[in-house]
Image (spheres, rainbow, N blue to C red):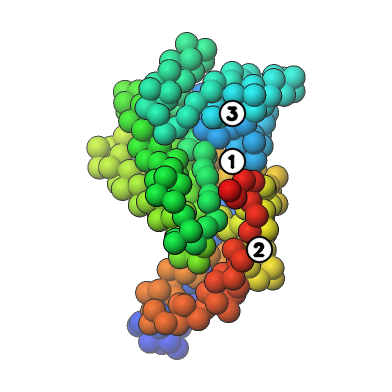
Amino acid sequence: MIGLVFSTFGYFGGAVFLFVVIRLIYSALKNNGLLLKKSVKGEHVFMTGGGAGIGKLMCFILAKQGAKVTVTDINQEWAEQTAKEVKEAGGEAVAVKCDVTVVDDITKAAKVARDTFGDVTILINNAGIVTGKKILETSHQLAEKTLQVNTLAHIYTVKEFLPSMIKKNHGHIVSIASSAGLVGCPGLVDYCASKYGAVGFDESLRLEVKKIGANINTTCICPTFIKTDMFKGAKANEFLVPLLEPDWIAERIVLAIRQNESMLMTPFISNTIYLTRALLPTFFLDLYMKAIGVNESMDHFSGRNKD
């Protein structure tokens, strides 16, 4: 069979063909949950931004599957409400107010987490913000805040929890990044910069833990727009880049964690970005982004709190 492929397409063409086929098969297996899955029962999850959106949904899913959840959010009321609802549903949870841009807040939240459930074994860096403003309309303060929350906070939390994971030789670190960390978008200059940083952070971290031989997994999540208030009003070509349902993406992220997926890019069209950038001139990538509606996707953005 392989010989037939190479004789038909030549060595280069055959290699590309086989790579595409293997990639499609692998994607089909993981997207349908057909890869080997680990249990999260008994794991201690530290969730940033767990008071609302997909963070809150993931807290419920993980608790239902037997994980103990420390719910953190800058909004204490939201965090407490999530923890209350998780416990009412039969799960284990504790709420802590935490501004992820303040190292001292992370240290204090980590102490509460450890005192309640022991060492954190799954860290999910989910907290995120978006201004949705063009670069000349974005204040220095807002741009800095975007980078602090979406990128630097990942460094702060990992430095807090990675040592115990290495000591136990067990752990999982999840970076909620974005397709905006793979390709640029007008109206999201500061956000894209921060999410590119999150993607690069995850990849470097993955290689570091592998280099020392630690049994610690990392997962980078790169979805397109999700139907939450955070990106209210934003949309691209609905056929090619559909708005993702919060319940679905929350379930899919937990599945990615359980399957130890290194990266989740969804919907599938996101996977074409790397290939397009590698094989074609930059102007073609720009045309491609315009054709699928990315360039105009933020034109009607209102968001949770645009101002």
- The residue drawn where x is 59% and y is 74% is 292
1 or 193, which lies in front? 193
Q: Nearer the viewer, residue 9 or 211?
A: 211
Report helix, strand or loop for mark 2. loop
User: Disc 2 marks which residue?
Assistant: 300
Q: Could you say which quadrant of the image residue 80 lies in?
A: top right
Above or below for 131 versus 93: below
Q: What residue appears at the point 35 percent right and 37 percent down from the top-left corner?
A: 155
Q: Nearer the viewer, residue 229 or 157?
A: 229
Q: Where residue 183 sits in the image (x, y, percent)?
A: 45, 65
Q: Residues within 10 Å of mark 2 (few under 14, many from 20)?
A: few
Whether residue 16 is visible: yes
The amino acid sitting under disc 2 is His
Q: Are marks 2 and 1 in contact (CB under 8 Å)?
A: no
Q: Secondary structure at mark 1?
A: helix
For marks 3 and 1, the one nearer the N-term is 3
Q: Which residue is mark 3?
A: 75
At x 46% / y 20%, what residue is drawn? 109
- Look at the image and tell me whether residue 260 can be seen: no
- Looking at the image, residue 60 sits to the left or right of residue 106; the answer is right
Describe residue 26's horizontal placement relative to residue 57 as left or right: left
Query: What is the CA distance from the residue labelled 3 to the residue labelled 2?
Result: 27 Å
Q: Residue 3 placed where, x, y %?
A: 41, 80
Q: Which mark is residue 254?
A: 1
Residue at (43, 18) in percent of width and height: 108
Q: How far is disc 3 from disc 1 in space, using C-alphas?
A: 23 Å
